[in-house]
Image: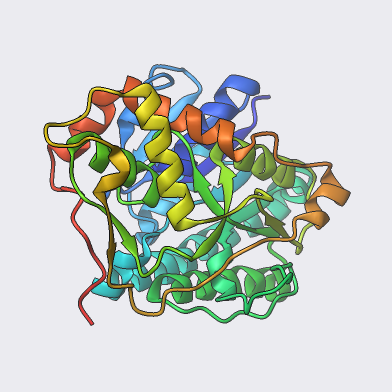
Amino acid sequence: MTHTLLVTGGAGFIGSAVVREVLAASAWRVVNVDKLTYSGNLASLADVADSPRYHFIRADIADAAAMRAAFEIFEPDAVMHLAAESHVDRSIDSPAAFLETNVRGTFTLLEEARRYWKNLLAADPAKARDFRFHHISTDEVFGDLSGGEDFFTEKTPYAPSSPYSASKAASDHLVRAWQRTYGLPALVTNCSNNYGPRQFPEKLIPLTILNALAGRELPVYGDGGQIRDWLHVEDHVRALLLVLAHGRVGETYAVGGHCERRNIDVVRAICDFLEEMAPQKPKGVSRYEELIRFVRDRPGHDGRYAIDASKIATELGWRPRETFAAGLRKTVRWYLDNEAWWRAILDGSYRCERLGTRV
């Protein structure tokens, strides 16, 4: 019998990578539940849209009736919960949407998953035993590392700094509470900054690429010294599927790229790749790096994130395969080769404008 994976947020950056990988590497059926807000993009799933094992439901995870119907119709063997509002700058301007999706939406999904799983216990105990609810979160819930050689681990106390990270912290706590109190077989992963093809261009790497190609300024917050641990999306997807298949119920796994870089160094590396790959520059630009502009830092900006991923390495054998230099080169190449994908986004409501200044 074919197994079924229900993916929330499957039209997003990481979610669509999960959907594509599961359909390509397994015989599982995938049900994608996505509200298709501004960053949801079905074009990211064009390669699998016609697969008989792929099903799309346009729905809000905070809609209990729609979630109940998804569980009852498709009877999933597992849930990967990726649907979330995820951009810090947007959360500063409009925090209510983050509470609605990340907190109330997660609560609603948990309740419907619990209802479904409880019915499975009576109707199909073997399927209930193997059912998993995998919640995907972020390292931003841990706040700001103080410096030195310390890293986030699965035991790091939560100290979120933004409305976004606070809402994700709340969702993490809900998942763990539903596992502890109700026995729902749940797992949590907290990942570092993802990058790669098909990322919505409000994030640092695609925003820098597209602004540079257009000859626009490349805004760098503060002095650009903020450090992030970069994880290629395909490495992340491999980790997620390993955790889903072999992770221990009730456990948390931190997933990092072992690749710390300052934001300013990431921007400069992109400029260097563009010098090589796109030497015909916009009018008036002699070098891409001259477009860099240091701008006022965003409120509450964390200085450093870095993950100790030794637990998932030891227990599940996962390690990142992609180096940052190679992964970034491939990412820049993808945006150069797939203008139709990002042009459709820029022709809509998004214009690469700065957000997160309404304080």
Question: 120 or 88: which is nearer to us?
Answer: 88
Above-or-below relation of 63 to 10? below
Question: 222 or 197: which is nearer to us?
Answer: 222
In the rendered structure, the answer to whether residue 75 lies left or right of residue 54 reads right
In the rendered structure, the answer to whether residue 36 lies left or right of residue 173 reads left
Residue at image location 53% in from the left, 42% down from the top: 6
Above-or-below relation of 281 to 174? above
Residue at image location 26% in from the left, 70% down from the top: 356
Question: Can residue 51 be seen at all in this image of the molecule?
Answer: yes
In the rendered structure, the answer to whether residue 21 lies left or right of residue 205 reads right
Q: Quadrant of residue 223?
A: bottom left
Residue at image location 28% in from the left, 72% down from the top: 296
Q: Which x, y percent locates residue 114?
A: 59, 62
Q: Quadrant of residue 10?
A: top left
Q: Which x, y percent locates residue 80?
A: 57, 48
Question: 50 or 353: which is nearer to us?
Answer: 353
Quarter of the picture containing the N terminus is top right
**Residue projecting furthest to the front:** 286
